[in-house]
């Protein structure tokens, strides 16, 4: 969003527009050309064109010397300075008949907003126009609040920029922050948990398909008993082997 225009920029734009009009080349009108062509002592077109070209060159030279951008800026600054001094005079003399808040006051500037009186400075106008005076007080209050909000936002932006500058040194070479291995959205931990969820779903489906006969408690007890006896028999045969423990 572009910044709000100041008094100087507005006046400079106006002066530049007016000087641009004065710098435009001239040309004979159609009516004059028709009248000249119909005259018995008509001026030759060549002489007319030469005279017009000479005048236009003079206009361009005058415009470049007098209406330069630096000159326009200087004039705009002088106008703005005159308005500022006039506004200060009105602020210092609120009871003056000509006192008041000038339209030219830059209400974008924080300093100008802070100098605005909370109520209309002229008591005479307050009594004569109570509704306008009330609206002025409400407008000044809203303008002051908005100015404070802008100031707070500017301070917050400065703090965030300072914080960003502080943590900039902790960035890795690939541009990722130092916390890329933490649990974050779409991070590596979340992807592994997603894989585990699918794996658990597959295992649960396989277990639910096992038959009751293969998972019964009695069959499990028989198999466990036979395994225990076979292990005991192997141990006894191992201990009785003369090749391992010669007598």
Image (tube, rainbow, N blue to C red):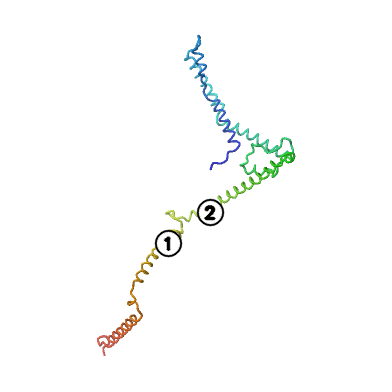
The answer to whether 231 appears left or right of 74 in the picture is: left
The answer to whether 8 appears left or right of 134 in the picture is: left
Label 2 crowd bin: few (<14), some (14–19), many (20+), radius 10 Å: few
Q: First in sequence: mark 1 or mark 2? A: 2
Residue 154 in the image, given as x and y percentages of width and height: 57, 48
In the image, farthest residue toward the bottom: 247
Q: Quadrant of residue 192?
A: bottom left
Residue 121 in the image, given as x and y percentages of width and height: 72, 41
Query: Which residue position holds label 1?
Result: 190
Eyeballing the image, is 88 above or below 180?
A: above
In the image, farthest residue toward the top: 40
Eyeballing the image, is 65 above or below 163?
A: above
> Which residue is rendered at x = 66% and y = 45% of the image?
138
In the picture, the quarter occupied by the C terminus is bottom left
> Which residue is rendered at x = 57% and y = 51% of the image?
156
Give residue 163's mark: 2
């Amino acid at each position: 969003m572009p910044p709000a225009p100041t008094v100087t920029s507005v006046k400079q734009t106006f002066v530049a527009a007016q000087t641009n009009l004065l710098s435009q080349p001239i040309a004979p009108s159609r009516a004059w050309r028709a009248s000249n062509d119909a005259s018995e002592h008509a001026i030759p077109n060549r002489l007319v064109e030469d005279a017009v070209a000479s005048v236009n060159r003079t206009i361009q030279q005058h415009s470049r010397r007098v209406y330069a951008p630096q000159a326009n800026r200087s004039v705009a600054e002088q106008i703005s300075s005159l308005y500022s001094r006039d506004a200060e005079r009105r602020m210092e003399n609120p009871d003056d008949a000509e006192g008041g808040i000038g339209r030219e006051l830059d209400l974008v500037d924080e300093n100008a907003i802070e100098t605005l009186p909370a109520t209309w400075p002229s008591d005479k106008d307050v009594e004569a126009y109570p509704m306008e005076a009330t609206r002025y007080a409400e407008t000044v209050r809203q303008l002051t609040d908005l100015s404070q909000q802008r100031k707070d936002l500017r301070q917050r932006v400065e703090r965030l920029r300072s914080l960003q500058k502080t943590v900039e040194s902790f960035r890795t070479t690939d541009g990722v922050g130092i916390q890329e291995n933490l649990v974050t959205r779409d991070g590596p931990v979340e992807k592994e948990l997603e894989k585990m969820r699918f794996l658990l779903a597959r295992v649960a489906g396989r277990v639910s398909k096992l038959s009751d006969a293969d998972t019964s408690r009695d069959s499990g007890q028989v198999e466990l008993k036979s395994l225990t006896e076979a292990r005991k028999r192997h141990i006894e045969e191992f201990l009785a082997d003369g090749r391992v423990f010669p007598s």
